[in-house]
Amino acid sequence: MNHYRNIFYAIGISAFTISFFFTLFFAYKAMQFDQIIEKKTKAKKTNAHYVLISEELNNEYWRLVEKGAKAAGRRYHVSIEYNGPLQSNLSEHMKLIDMAISSKVDGIITQGLSEEKFTPLINKAMKKGIPVITVDTDAAKSKRVSYVGTDNYRSGYLAGKALIAGTKGKAVVGIITGSFEASHQKLRVEGFKDAIKNKPGIKVVDIKASNITKVQAAEKANEILSEHPDVNAFYGTSALDGLGIAQVIKRQGHEKKIYIISFDTLPETLQLMKQGFIQATVVQKPYKIGYESVKLMHEFKKGRHIPSTIHTDTGILYQKDIAKGDVSP
Ligand code: BGC
C-alpha cells in the first residue's frame, strides 16, 4: 500500500515540478518578446524621417541626388522619402513641401526654385521646428539652415569662358534654359552673359525655355535655328537641354558645324560627347549633393554647427577629356 502511495507522490511532485518550470520558461519567453517589441518601437521612434522633394520625380539627374541621399540615410540610420512632381511644376512642388510640413517630417531637403515663392514655405517649416536644407538651387534669403549644391552663377560663368575658347571668340549663340522662373537657371544664364560681355565676337540672339524636358529643348532649338539661321552655337542650362539640342543638330546633319555646351554628365550626354555632337559640359555632383544634404541634416539635428553654404565642385568637361576616359561625375 505504502509503495503505491510513494509512487503516487513521486508522480505528483514530478508533474508539479515540470509544470512549474514550464510556467517559468514561458513567462521568461513572454518577457523577452515584450522587450523586443519595446525595443523595435523605440527604434522606430528614434529613426528620423527626412523627405527629399525634387523638381521632377523621374528626372535622371534627380535620381542621382536620391541615390546619394539614400546612401547617407543608410549610413546615418535615417529614413529618406523621395518625392517630386511627375513633371516639373512649381505649384505641385510647393504643394508637396506643404504636405511634408503638415505630416510633421523631421527634415525637408528641397530646391529653393523661386526665392519669392518658396521663402514663405521654407520659413513656415522652420517656424514649426522642421529644418529645411536647400539643394541644387538656393533660396538664400529664406531661413533655411543650409544650401548644398553648385555655385550656379559660377557654373554659368565657366560655361561662357569655355564657349569663348571653343569658338575662338566668334559665335552666334542660342540658349535653351530649363525655366525662366527658376533661380538657378537664371543664375546660369547671368553668369554666362557676364563671361561673354566683353567679347564683341560672341552674340546671344535668342533664349527659350524647355521646362526641363528633352522634347521641348529639341522643339525650341529647332525654332531658334529656323528663326536665326546664323546660329552656330548653343548653350543648354539644364541636364536634358543639351540632349534635345543635339537631337536636332543630328537630325539636320549639322554636326561639327554647331558648337554645343551642355549641363551635367548623364550617360547620354557623355555618349553624345564621344560621338562629337556636344563639345563641352558643365559638371555637377548630384550624388554628392544628395549625400551631403542628408549628412548635414543629421548633424544639424544632433545640435552640431553646420555651414550655411556648401558649394559642391563644378567645372567643365571637354570632349577631349572624354576620349581620355577622364570622367568624374
Ligand atoms: C539642374 C536641376 C534640374 C535638372 C533638369 C540640372 O542641371 O541642376 O535643377 O532639375 O537639370 O534636368
Image (cartoon, rainbow, N blue to C red):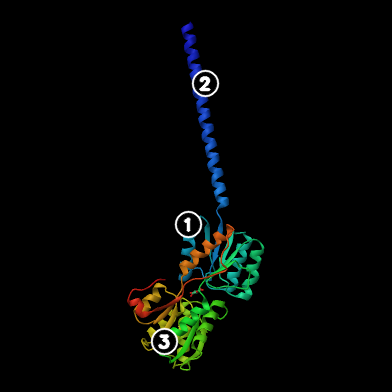
Q: Is residue 92 above or below residue 176?
A: above
Circle 3: residue type: Ala
Q: CA distance from mark 1 to mark 3?
A: 43 Å
Quarter-of-image position of residue 280: bottom left
Mark 1 lies within 8 Å of ligand 1 (Cβ measured): no
Residue in the foreground of this view, choosing between 108 and 81:
108
Tell me the tag on residue 75. 1
Residue 214 appears left or right of 108: left
**Which residue is at a point 47% across and 81% down the rendered structure image?**
158
Residue 144 appears left or right of 245: right
User: Is there CB contact under 8 Å for labels 1 and 2?
Assistant: no
Residue in the foreground of this view, choosing between 84 and 38:
38
Mark 3 lies within 8 Å of ligand 1 (Cβ measured): no
**Which residue is at a point 52% across and 32% down the rendered structure image?**
26
Quarter-of-image position of residue 257: bottom left
Mark 3 is surrounded, within 10 Å at the Cα level, by few (under 14), some (14 to 19) or many (20 or more) other residues, namely few
Instruction: Please state which of the two labelled residues, at mark 2 or mark 3, is closer to the viewer.
Output: 3
User: Is there CB contact under 8 Å for labels 1 and 3?
Assistant: no
Q: Position of residue 229 (x, y in %)?
A: 44, 93
Residue 55 appears left or right of 163: right
Q: Position of residue 215 (x, y in %)?
A: 46, 79
Q: Circle 2 is placed at which residue position? A: 16
Q: Secondary structure at mark 2?
A: helix
Circle 2: residue type: Phe
Counting residues from the N terminus, which is met first, the one under dot 1 or under dot 3? 1
Q: Secondary structure at mark 3?
A: helix
Q: CA distance from mark 2 to mark 3?
A: 95 Å
Q: CA distance from mark 1 to mark 2?
A: 53 Å
Q: Circle 3 is placed at which residue position? A: 165
Q: Position of residue 163 (x, y in %)?
A: 43, 85
Q: Position of residue 65 (x, y in %)?
A: 48, 67
Counting residues from the N terminus, which is met first, the one under dot 2 or under dot 3? 2
